[in-house]
Image: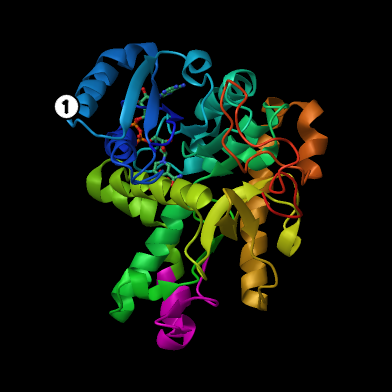
């Protein structure tokens, strides 16, 4: 029997990332080849003509899994009953800018979107923030959604994870599928820490297969600065690779990480690895049953500990800048992450879905 369609809302749907992303979703690359989707596409009013053009192209692909497309010029309509919300729409940076330069222009957008998700989305909605600065925008959105669990909000650091994997594979002559256990810690910014200490290539420790100088002096800065390098080369920020990373992030969250593999996801810190609570930080996670779990017990040497601190510090500074967008009423839930979570199952507007005492509804440290 065909599954019931799920509702995927996408903001910035006429933008560059979405021009790759929407076609992947409609083709079943994100939610699975047996999962029909309803695309709820959202843009600003001035971009609705362009959005209609994208919708026509989607229709012209005649994707078997594309159930319905709806177009919206406001998030309140666009997020209605959404099971998944991909918050892509925001201003990208240009040459010479840092992502944090976007805090002022983009912050307000995410406060409104958090409120709209709170008021209109499915109670079980899973949210991924891509618009930059992604971690801090995720914090803003989540803090403005008092009735949703903070664990339902995530931000995109999978692009950094994929970049690290691709660059390591290229350096060592491996293929990306041979590489496991990459971790990206912290902020989606130049302070992020791409950590190879737990990575393997064909089952052997990656760190033994690269020169330590290359790792510290070339690899780490290259991954950290890859966004800028692409902007300089293309004149525009990465788009197709960002779309692929969004698909990978959501695919793993919903359908599970490969056995034995970890993914990097920006999520609300619960204090793991000494990272201060109340900020969105990229951690190594495993996903199962539609939820993510921080991989515990990873040994960190002094170098790694220092790198984790640097990026944490930057996130705390970003948080201070947007403090006026963070309502006080949600401070406690974010500083003491509740482990009773709703993000594990897909609920429909007619109330169907697992009942509240499903064994997957509450759990320890699984989000
Ligand atoms: P783009 O300018 O091509 O498209 C953005 C679209 O968002 C535009 O069509 C714009 O009209 C729309 N938009 C703006 N405000 C909106 C709102 N309030 N509601 C709905 N739509 C809105 O940009 P892009 O290249 O698609 O990038 C989008 C964002 O993603 C940027 O902030 C960029 O920096 C970020 N990004 C993040 C990552 C990551 O790894 N986290 C990677 C690449 C890009
Ligand atoms: C990226 O990493 O490519 C994006 O965040 C875009 C940017 O501004 O770097």
* Residue depicted at x 51% and y 60%: 263
Whole-percent x, y for residue 148 in the image: 68, 31
- Residue most toward the front? 1
244 drawn magenta = no
Could you say which quadrant of the image residue 171 lies in? bottom left
Along the viewing direction, whichever of 104 and 354 lies nearer the viewer: 354
Q: Is residue 123 shown above or below 229?
A: above
Residue pointed to by mark 1: 60
Along the viewing direction, whichever of 176 and 229 lies nearer the viewer: 176
Label 1, secondary structure: give it. Answer: helix
Q: Is residue 20 shown above or below 51?
A: below
Q: Which residues are magenta?
A: 194-219
Q: Is residue 78 shown above or below 148?
A: above
> Which corner quadrant holds the N terminus?
top left
Whole-percent x, y for residue 279 in the image: 68, 45
Could you say which quadrant of the image residue 27 lies in? top left
Mark 1 surroundings within 10 Å by alpha-carbon count, few (fewer than 14), some (14 through 19), many (20 or more): few
Location of ligand 1 given as a quarter of the image: top left
Along the viewing direction, whichever of 242 and 191 lies nearer the viewer: 242
- For residue 297, say whether it is visible: yes
- For residue 222, say whether it is visible: no
């Amino acid at each position: 029997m065909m599954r019931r369609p799920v509702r995927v809302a996408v903001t910035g749907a006429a933008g560059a990332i979405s021009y790759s992303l929407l076609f992947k979703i409609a083709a079943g690359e994100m939610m699975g080849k047996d999962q029909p989707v309803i695309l709820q596409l959202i843009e600003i009013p001035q971009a609705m003509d362009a959005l209609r053009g994208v919708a026509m192209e989607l229709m012209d692909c005649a994707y078997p899994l594309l159930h319905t497309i709806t177009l919206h010029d406001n998030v309140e309509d666009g997020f209605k009953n959404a099971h998944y919300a991909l918050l892509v729409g925001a201003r990208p940076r240009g040459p010479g800018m840092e992502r944090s330069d976007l805090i002022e222009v983009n912050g307000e957008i995410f406060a409104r979107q958090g409120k709209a998700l709170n008021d209109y989305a499915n109670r079980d909605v899973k949210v991924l923030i891509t618009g930059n600065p992604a971690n801090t925008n995720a914090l803003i959105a989540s803090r403005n959604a008092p009735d949703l669990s903070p664990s339902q909000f995530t931000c995109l650091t999978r692009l950094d994870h994929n970049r690290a994997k691709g660059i390591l594979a290229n350096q060592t002559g491996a293929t990306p599928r041979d590489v496991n256990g990459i971790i990206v810690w912290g902020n989606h910014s130049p302070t992020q820490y791409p950590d190879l200490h737990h990575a393997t290539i064909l089952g052997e420790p990656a760190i033994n297969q690269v020169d330590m100088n290359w790792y510290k002096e070339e690899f780490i800065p290259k991954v950290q600065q890859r966004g800028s390098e692409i902007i300089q080369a293309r004149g525009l920020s990465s788009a197709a690779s960002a779309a692929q990373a969004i698909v990978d992030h959501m695919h793993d969250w919903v359908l599970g990480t490969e056995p034995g593999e970890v993914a990097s996801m920006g999520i609300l810190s619960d204090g793991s690895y000494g990272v201060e609570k109340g900020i969105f930080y990229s951690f190594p996670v495993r996903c199962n049953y539609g939820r993510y779990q921080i991989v515990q017990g990873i040994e960190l040497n002094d170098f790694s500990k220092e790198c984790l601190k640097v990026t944490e510090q930057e996130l705390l500074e970003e948080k201070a800048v947007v403090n006026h967008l963070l309502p006080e009423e949600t401070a406690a839930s974010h500083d003491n992450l509740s482990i009773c979570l709703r993000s594990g199952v897909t609920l429909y507007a007619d109330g169907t879905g697992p009942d509240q005492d499903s064994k997957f509804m509450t759990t320890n440290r699984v989000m």
